[in-house]
């Protein structure tokens, strides 16, 4: 059993299977519980009703027996009332009257003396003149002794199994007996209740069939509900999978677009700056060579100009490399990297940049630093291309809930149509924050635009002072984000 349960719990379920089980198992358990309760209550109610029906039918039979015995007593009452205890003639006349009083196909009167001897049994004459004290039926119930005991008390009913006179087959019989105390006789009659028991059995079978039908209906409803849940889950799963595939395709396309945009930007940078600078260097060196060949004293000036252009190319390569992956971000942290980018942006575009930060008690992890740096870079790029702003305020600082980056300009903002359908850059910002479980706010008005990115506290590393010092510490540098 334990191994079987271990195998069940060791099975790895998919997310859809877990959701299906979570939806169906409580439903099945609830419907099963309801079904069992209905089944139990229905059977209890049926048992009570059938028991009541049986009691009513048997009570009617007993009343019928009492009427029969009243008729018999009326017939022999005058004789018994006027006779003495030892009046043999009166006793013979009463026995003759009772022997002649039969009714229906099975009804008759019987007489036993208090010693157990049968005196009258018109339909089963083999019982007459024999002592049946101690007789028991097939179920072990005392018969004659119990009838005599009830007669000694006066009257009473007794139920036992007795062979039917018409067929000889045993059947349940209810007898009503009275006692003639002067003659020490037990006089009674009986009626077979197999018809009552058959009616009760039929009622019980009908009730059981109705209960089973109700339980089957509940099972059918449960199965239909489970099937409906399964089909709904299948439909939702297929729909979600289709949506996920569409989103994946769109994301893949955005990745390709981003790659192509980055490649185009790098290609434009190389063509517009590095390529032109290198071409100028080549022409300058060729001019220096020609001047040197003709002995022109200006050859050295051409070499100096070429070297200066070559230094410019080196600086341009460094700038492109810094845009792709700034080394200061890894060496000094997010704060210096953003400050350097803001200063370079202001120098290159002529837009005034006000940069503000505060020391971080906790340090950001690598993913958060890269995400905030790229968001700031994309924000400055959008400001340069689209805003027409003359001033930018950039803020980065730590808070009680994490770290926050805010870039705000005084440009023309973003129109409503574009705000509802943001471009690739804004979608990239949102996706970066979504991967970090952060938040991105974009507020655009006619007087400017504000982008605010917030990283949760879970991406903050412990303070540097709480980490154990290494055995061979490196030279100290100014700590930042």
Image: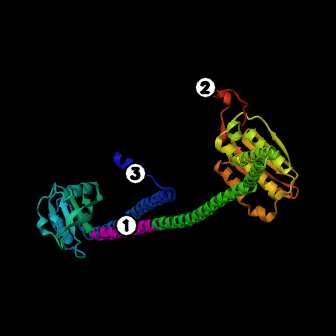
What residue sits 47% from the left and 59% below the top? 28
Dot 2 lies on which element?
loop
Q: CA distance from mark 3 to mark 2?
A: 49 Å
In the rendered structure, the answer to whether residue 366 lies left or right of residue 445 reads: left
Give the camera-side residue of 387 and 240.
387
Vertical relation: 479 (above or below) 325: above
Query: Mark 3 or 2 closer to N-term?
Result: 3
Vertical relation: 393 (above or below) 385: above
In the rendered structure, the answer to whether residue 288 lies left or right of residue 43 reads: right
What range of the chain is rendered magenta?
A: 193-220
The circle on residue 208 is 1
> Where residue 13 sits in the image (x, y, percent)?
46, 54
User: Can residue 272 be seen in this snapshot?
Assistant: yes
Give the camera-side residue of 93 and 439.
439
> Where residue 208 sits in the image (x, y, percent)?
37, 66
Q: Of tags 3 and 2, which is closer to the observer?
A: 2
Q: CA distance from mark 1 to mark 3?
A: 36 Å
The circle on residue 8 is 3
Name the image quarter holding residue 173. Answer: bottom left
What residue sits 42% from the left and 52% below the top? 11
Residue 422 part of the magenta-drawn span: no
Residue at the outermost front position: 294
Residue 207 part of the magenta-drawn span: yes
Q: Which residue is the site of mark 2?
A: 470
Quadrant (top left/top right/bottom left/bottom right) for the C terminus:
top right
Q: CA distance from mark 1 to mark 2?
A: 82 Å
Vertical relation: 136 (above or below) 79: above
Dot 1 lies on which element?
helix
């Amino acid at each position: 059993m334990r191994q079987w349960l271990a195998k069940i719990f060791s099975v790895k379920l998919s997310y859809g299977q877990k959701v299906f089980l979570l939806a169906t198992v409580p439903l099945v358990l609830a419907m099963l519980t309801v079904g069992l309760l209905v089944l139990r209550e229905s059977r209890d109610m049926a048992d009570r009703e059938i028991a009541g029906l049986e009691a009513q039918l048997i009570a009617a039979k007993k009343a019928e027996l009492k009427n029969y015995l009243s008729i018999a007593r009326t017939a022999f009452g005058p004789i018994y009332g006027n006779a003495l205890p030892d009046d043999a003639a009166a006793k013979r006349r009463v026995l003759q009257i009772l022997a002649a009083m039969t009714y229906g196909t099975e009804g008759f009167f019987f007489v036993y003396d208090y010693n157990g001897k049968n005196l009258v049994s018109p339909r089963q004459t083999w019982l007459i003149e024999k002592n049946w004290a101690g007789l028991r039926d097939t179920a072990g119930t005392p018969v004659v002794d119990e009838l005599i005991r009830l007669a000694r008390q006066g009257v009473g009913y007794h139920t036992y199994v007795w062979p039917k006179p018409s067929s000889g087959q045993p059947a349940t019989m209810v007898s009503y007996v009275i006692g003639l105390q002067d003659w020490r006789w037990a006089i009674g009659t009986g009626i077979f209740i197999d018809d009552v028991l058959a009616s009760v059995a039929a009622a019980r079978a009908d009730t059981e069939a109705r209960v089973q039908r109700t339980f089957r209906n509940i099972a059918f409803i449960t199965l239909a509900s489970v099937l409906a849940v399964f089909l709904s889950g299948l439909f939702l799963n297929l729909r979600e999978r289709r949506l996920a595939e569409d989103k994946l395709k769109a994301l893949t396309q955005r990745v390709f677009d981003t790659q192509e945009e980055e490649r185009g930007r790098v290609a434009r940078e190389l063509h517009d700056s590095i390529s032109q600078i290198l071409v100028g260097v080549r022409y300058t060196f060729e001019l220096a060579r020609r001047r040197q060949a003709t002995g022109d004293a200006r050859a050295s000036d051409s070499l100096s100009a070429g070297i200066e252009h070559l230094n410019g190319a080196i600086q341009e390569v460094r700038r492109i490399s810094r845009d792709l992956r700034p080394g200061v971000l890894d060496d000094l942290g997010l704060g210096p990297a953003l400050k350097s980018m803001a200063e370079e942006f202001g120098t290159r575009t002529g837009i005034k940049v006000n940069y503000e930060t505060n020391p971080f008690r906790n340090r950001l992890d690598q993913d958060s630093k890269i995400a905030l740096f790229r968001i700031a870079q994309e924000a400055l790029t959008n400001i340069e291309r689209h805003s027409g702003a003359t001033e930018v305020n950039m803020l980065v600082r730590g808070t009680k809930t994490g770290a926050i980056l805010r870039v705000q300009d005084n440009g023309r903002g973003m129109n409503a149509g574009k705000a509802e359908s943001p471009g690739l850059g804004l979608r990239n910002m949102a996706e970066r924050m979504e991967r970090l479980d952060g938040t991105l706010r974009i507020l655009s008005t006619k007087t400017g635009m504000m982008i605010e990115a917030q990283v949760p506290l879970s991406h903050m590393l412990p303070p540097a002072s709480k980490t154990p010092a290494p055995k061979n510490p490196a030279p100290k540098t100014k700590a930042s984000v």
